[in-house]
Amino acid sequence: MAKKQQTISERNIRLISIIEKNKEIARSFTKICMRIITMGGVVLIIYFFMKYIYLSVKELSGKKTVADILVKFLGSINVSVIISLTFGVGGVIYGYVEKRLKKKTISRLQERIDFLEKKQNPKKKSSYITNEGNTRKDDL
């Protein structure tokens, strides 16, 4: 009976090892399939994108179109003008976003600051600065 028990447990161990090997093979196969699907999708997107660009250029070749006029106009603009406009507009947008972020942060932290100031010195009067950190209109 002990020998029979031992052989059953040996069989179980062998089956478990076979199952573990099959799991690893299945995981590897799945990883490879996912990589193939991902790369295949990228290749298909690039293929169709390039195909339609080629067909568009072929269709418009030799014809006077709005695209031709637009290309000539954009070609006449200096690169330095484009770069300076890009940095200028980008700087203005960056400044506006940072200003909004600063006001949001100040208003978010203002309640805690008021509480700590009152805790430290309850008799101190407020400076009457708004919750966004702006000066009152009466003080201007």
Image (cartoon, helix red, strand yellow):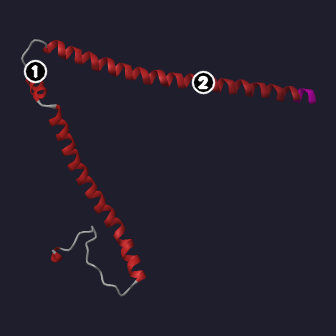
Q: Secondary structure at mark 2?
A: helix
**Which residue is nearer to you in this view: 23 or 7?**
23
Q: Earlier in the sequence, mark 1 or mark 2?
A: 2
Whole-percent x, y for residue 3 in the image: 92, 27
- Does residue 85 belong to the magenta stretch? no
Looking at the image, is 62 positioned above or below residue 75?
above
Q: Is residue 21 left or right of residue 48?
A: right
Snapshot quadrant of residue 14: top right
Closer to us: 23 or 41:
41
Residue at the (39%, 84%) spot, across then down: 121
- Under mark 1, the amino acid is Asp
Most prominent secondary structure in the magenta stretch?
helix
- Name the residue rendered at 18%, 40% in the picture: 84
Residue 94 appears anywhere in the view = yes
Q: Quadrant of residue 64?
A: top left
x and y, in percent, of residue 57 in the image: 18, 15
Q: Which residue is denoted by mark 2 in the rendering?
A: 26
> Would residue 53 be found to the left or right of residue 110 on screen?
left
Tell me the amino acid under the disc marked 2: Ala
Q: Which mark is residue 68?
A: 1
Residue range of the region highlighted in magenta in the rendering = 1-5
Q: Secondary structure at mark 1?
A: helix
Image: 119 above or below 15: below
Whether 75 is drawn above or below 61: the answer is below
The number of discs equals 2
Q: CA distance from mark 1 to mark 2?
A: 54 Å
| Residue 118 coordinates in the image, percent (x, y) | 38, 81
What number is the disc on residue 137? none
What residue do we see at 8% from left, 20% from top?
A: 65
Quadrant of the drawing holding the N terminus: top right
